[in-house]
């Protein structure tokens, strides 16, 4: 691997850890197990979303609900494969 390719690889990997470079849905996937545990314990979606907002998320309640549905569907399809 050339020096240029190595630098590019490092730069792209760094993007995966930069919250400003990733969508809220991508970041939600990272904490989905914790979100599901909170919801299963009876925590309201609004309270979970408020905690996400405290940590840099900007999604609305409607987009949060939609993202939950999409991620759950992805997980179900992945489990069946």
Image (cartoon, rainbow, N blue to C red):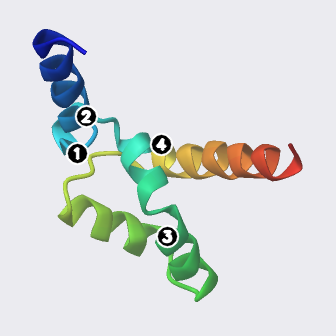
* Rendered residue at 62%/47% (across/down): 71
* Quadrant of the snapshot with the C terminus: top right
> Residue beneath label 2, please?
13
As rendered, which of 58 and 20 lies closer to the eye? 20
Residue 35 marker: 3
Is label 2 in a helix, a strand or a loop? helix
Is label 4 in a helix, a strand or a loop? helix
User: Does residue 53 appear to the left or right of 4 in the view shown?
Assistant: right
Residue 38: x %, y % from top left? 51, 80
* Rendered residue at 41%/71% (across/down): 48
User: Does residue 67 appear to the left or right of 20 in the view shown?
Assistant: right
Find the distance from the CA under tag 2 to the CA under tag 3.
25 Å
> Residue beneath label 1, please?
17
Find the distance from the CA under tag 1 to the CA under tag 4.
22 Å
Residue found farthest to the front:
1
Find the distance from the CA under tag 3 to the CA under tag 4.
15 Å
**Quadrant in the rendering for residue 42:** bottom right
In this rendering, the label closer to the viewer, 3 or 4: 3
* Rendered residue at 21%/33% (across/down): 15
As rendered, which of 26 and 60 lies closer to the eye? 26
Q: How many neighbours does mark 3 have within 10 angstroms: few (below 14), some (14-19), or many (20 or more)?
A: some
Residue 77 marker: none
Indicate which disc, 2 or 3, sits on the residue closer to the N terminus.
2
As rendered, which of 77 and 35 lies closer to the eye? 77
> Residue beneath label 4, please?
63
In this rendering, the label closer to the viewer, 1 or 4: 1
């Amino acid at each position: 691997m050339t020096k240029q390719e190595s630098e590019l690889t490092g730069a792209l990997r760094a993007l995966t850890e930069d919250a400003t470079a990733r969508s809220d849905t991508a970041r939600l996937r990272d904490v989905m197990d914790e979100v599901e545990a909170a919801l299963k314990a009876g925590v309201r979606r609004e309270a979970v979303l408020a905690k996400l907002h405290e940590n840099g998320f900007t999604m609305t309640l409607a987009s949060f609900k939609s993202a939950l549905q999409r991620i759950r569907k992805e997980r179900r399809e992945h489990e069946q494969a």
